[in-house]
Every structure is written in C-alpha cells, then in structure tokens.
Image: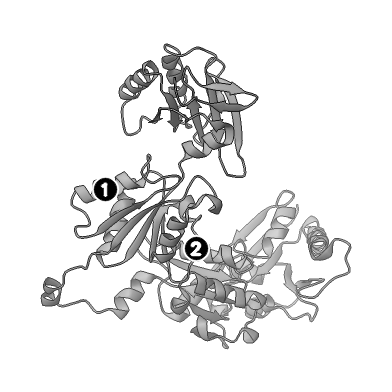
Amino acid sequence: MTGTLYGVGLGPGDPELMTVKAARLISEASVIAYHCARHGRSIARSVAEPYLREGQIEEKLVYPVTTETTDHPGGYEGAIADFYELSAKRLAEHLDAGRDVVLLCEGDPFFYGSYMYMHERLSGRFEAVVVPGVTSVSAASSVFGRPLVQRDEVLTVLPGTLPAPELARRLADTDAAAVLKLGRTFSAVREAFAEAGKLDDAVYVERATWGQQRVEPLASVDPSTVPYFSLALLPSPGYAARQSSPAPSPAATAASEPSGGEVVVVGLGPAGPEWLTPEAAVELSAAEHIVGYGPYVARVPQKAGQQRHASGNRVEADRAREALSLALGGARVAVVSSGDPGVFAMASAVLEQVAAGHGTGVRVRIVPGVTAAQAAASRVGAPLGHDYCVLSLSDRLKPWEIIEKRLDAAGAADLVLALYNPASRSRTTQLADARDVLLRHRAPATPVVVARDVGGPEEDIRVTTLGDLDPSTVDMRCLLIVGSSRTRADNGIVWTPRSY
C-alpha cells in the first residue's frame, strides 16, 4: 500500500483560520513537508506548528534560489525545475513506503501555491488530495473591512509580474481587483493603478491576519518596505460609492435634472494603431469612459482616470444604453467599433436607442474610421474603383430571404460586392448559397478577394474566382470582395476600371 499525498492549505497566516480538516491531517500525518529558503525558516511550518506532534518526519524542501542569481546552466528556471524534480523524488520515497505526506501550503494550494508543482509530478502515481484554504485575497478584504465584490461586479486577480501596460489595461477593464506577488514589482504595480485611474481607490495589505499586519492606502506606501507577502486590493466600487455618498433627499432628487453629456461613436479602423485616424485618437483621449466590445476596448491606448466598460459581442443595444446612461450625468463617452462605426456597427445601435427615448439631452457624434472593405481592397489594388455594394451575409438581424433578394439585385446590376460576416461556426451554408446566387449573373472566372485579419498578425489575402471559391476556407474574420463583369485580376493585382 502506498501513502497519500495531501496538499493542505493553511490559510493566510492566522493558525485559527485553518480548516478543521487541515488541522486533523497535519496531526495525523507521518511526514510533514514544507518549502523554505536557505535560512531554513518556514512560514508554513510556523502556521501549522500548533498541530504538529512528536515523532513526525519533517522534510524541508529548500529552494536553491529565491531572488539571487544562479550559475545553473538553465538559469533560474532550470534551477527551480531541477529542485521540483528532486523534491518530488524525496516525497515519492515516503509515499512508496506507505507513509502519508502532508505538504503545507500558505493560503490555498491551487491558488498560486507551491504545492501544484508536486501535484503535477506525483498525482499520476499516488493518490493526491487537496485541502483548500482561505486565500490571501479573502483575508485582505476582511482586515480592510470592505467587500471584494457584490451583485454583478467583476473581480480580477492578477500577478504583479505582468508588464505594467498590460496590468493597467486589465485594471481599467474590471470593477474590483487583487494584485499579488508584490515585493520588487511594487513600483510597477502602483504605476499601473495610476495609469488605470484607480490608484486613489486601492489599498495595500501586508501579512493579512498576522500579528504584524499592515493596511494603508496604496499611494502612500514606501516601495522599499514592501515584502513578497503583500497585495494591492481594489475593493467593491459599489460599496464605496454608497458609503461615501449619502442618499439624496426626495426633494433634492426631484429638483435635480441630469446634465446631458456626449457620446462619440469612434471607428478604430480594421486593426492596429496605424489604422486609427488623428481625429479618432483625439476623441479617445478626451473621453472619460470607453464603452465597447472587449477586444475593441483593449485596442484603445490607456489613459489615467479613464474608465472602461467592456462587454460581449452580441449586446449592442445594452452597450448603447449604458453609454447613453453614463453621458446623462455629463460625462464624455466614447463608444468604439472596429472599422467604421457606421458600417454594421455601433453608430446605428446608439441612434436606435436615442430614437427609443434613451439618453434624452445627450449629444451624439460619429467619428469615421477606415472600413474593412477599404483595407482589404488596398491590399490587392482597386477592386472598388467603380460602383459597389456593401452587404452583410449574417441573418441574425434580418432573414435570409432579404439577403438573397439583395444579392440577386446587386448581381443583376453588375455591382462589385463587399461581403461582410460571410460565415461563422453557426452559419456554414450562407456563403455557398450566396455564391450560387451570384453565379446566375457572373461568370465563374469573376475575381474574388478573400481577405482575413487585414492589418493583424494573421493577415492572409487570397485572390480566387467565383467558380473556385471554397466556402470551407472562409470564417467570421474574413471579408470578401466579389468583382463585377468589368473587374480584372492580373498577377495578384485586382482592379475595376472607372468607366465603361
């Protein structure tokens, strides 16, 4: 019979915050293992000490390096990998001998815990049981005396080792956050909070629930005093708002009228910052709130104090109402779209909600952007050099019968077509049907441009013909340009003459 490996979470530091199960397993185990630095002291062991008993075997797993350099040929990562392999072998000897092993882990074993490296090496050979523990995030929230999140708020947990710009982007996109692994990363973390406009709302918590715990505003902390066992906390914004702003009296509520702000619907172009117009860049910089589909919001450069409201791909109406509601209080709000906001995008969604009575008094402006059709055309020449039609093949907002009728009419009129939304995982037949409709009016040799991810890292531009078009090679990230009877294609260059 082999022994069982237990990854036991000890909680944040107070021995009384350990679970009953953790305390029982520690007292019953034959072997107690724990990590420590070269000095030999272990925080995990000190937390578990009240539950240890005489006669237990203790295995110190001493890290070969912590923050210092190493002469290991594989560098730091190589030294740590070798350490984990050696540690796993040491624990496996006890397990093979039938001895149960409890590996102590501060906080929760699977929450940035060191136990996970033993689990992945040993759980395939031996029974492995994980005992969860109270995390440092929960402990920090409790000692600060403020809830992490409530209702529909989103909590994001981040490692402080992320690059500051990425950390700032993620902080700007969330309601509440906890940033762990401070120590040497503290200055960059604080810079990220400032860049996200949330430094004044953040708190620093060190050694939560320990006797020497420390809680103070993040902005006032001396970086030279920050240890590894600390975190930055951005607690529930809703709770903070209610605590700092007493409810207005009924008379005051009746007397106050919202001052209308402004919603600017901004086109980002089809890809990176090189496609953004100077006018759009100015509007994005001036906005107090950025509203949009998550990947598009992520493309907007960070600005201190600017709040971000990212959402999913199919909630255009909700997104528009949120932007108008923010602007009702006098804020400047930018709603972002890929390409041009007036082409199958957010401009019409915002104006529809205005027409429905939302955002009365809010000014709405549209700032154009380079369209996907223009970008795709530029990669091959000038296929849009004469009259053309822009059509979406998505039947999510209009029935296929209407799409087919318009395809037939555009084909009969001999217009070049730019086809948006040609296919998706759930729409696999429309493009083949559209090709068949156009073949009623166009020769099979008609040039077709299949442009995927124009301006992005996976850009792929192909020129084929209407007869050879394979719908299975087309997905939602593609845009198609189908030539007219006048469109020419020579050596990858596609153009439509300006006159007949």
Which residue position is annotated with label 2? 156
Image spot of residue 248 (x, y percent)? 19, 77
Residue 237 in sight here: yes
Residue 88, which numbered label? none
Give neighbour class at mark 2: few <14, some 14-19, many 20+ (Cα, 10 Å): some
Query: 290 above or below 495?
Result: below
Mark 1–mark 2 Cα distance, whole angstroms, equals 33 Å
Tell me the residue at 78%/80% (across/down). 40
Mark 1 vs mark 2: which is more N-terminal?
2
Q: Nearer the viewer, residue 26 or 282?
A: 282
Q: Which mark is residue 351?
A: 1
Note whether residue 135 is visible: no
Image position of 281 (left or right of 344): right
The amino acid type found where label 2 is placed reads: Thr
Q: In percent of the image, x 31 and y 50: which residue is there?
A: 318
**Front residue of 149 and 412:** 412
Residue 343 percent coordinates (x, y): 38, 40
Outermost residue, front side = 499
Is disc 1 placed on a helix, strand or loop?
helix
Question: In the picture, residue 500 is in which quadrant?
Answer: top left
Mark 2 lies on a secondary structure that is: strand
The residue sitting at 20% across, 48% down in the picture is 355
Where 377 sits versus 369, above or below? above
Along the line of sight, which residue is nearer the eye, 445 or 322?
445
Residue 462, image x and y in percent?
Answer: 60, 28
Badge 1 crowding class, 10 Å Cα cut-off, few under 14, some 14 to 19, many 20 or more, is: some
Three-letter code for the amino acid on which mark 1 is drawn: Leu
